[in-house]
Amino acid sequence: MRTRIKEFRARYGLTQEDLAKIVGVRRQTILFIEGGDYNPSLKLAHNIARALNTTIDELFLFDE
């Protein structure tokens, strides 16, 4: 699974640390999700999408 988190963070001028604080996780969690090394729970994916004013479908790209 690929993500567009980094792209959306840039739109809002957020660092990984900023986003992590907003959604209540550690910066490393955001780093691992962005790198494709960790698949977030549905709740976390929803919280990240909400923080970035987008949808889960727009933010996470599921490989076929």
Image: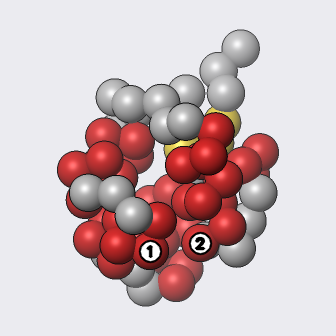
- Side (left or right) of 57 relative to 48: right
Amino acid type assigned to the residue bearing label 2 in the image: Ala
SS of the residue at dot 1? helix
Q: Which residue is drawn at 55% across and 36% down?
A: 41
Q: Is residue 40 above or below residue 5?
A: above
Seen as rendered, the residue at the extreme bottom is 13
Q: Distance between the residues labelled 1 and 2?
A: 7 Å
Q: Indicate the position of residue 8 as horizontal and vertical percent values.
A: 56, 68
Identify whether 62 is placed above or below 56.
Answer: above
**29 vs 63: above or below:** below
Number of the label disc, if any, that sits on residue 37 = none
Percent x, y for residue 28? 22, 50
Q: Which mark is residue 22?
A: 1
> Which residue, given by chain and number where applicable, does mark 2 sit on?
51
- Quarter of the rendering occupied by the C terminus: top right
Say whether marks 1 and 2 touch (CB < 8 Å): yes
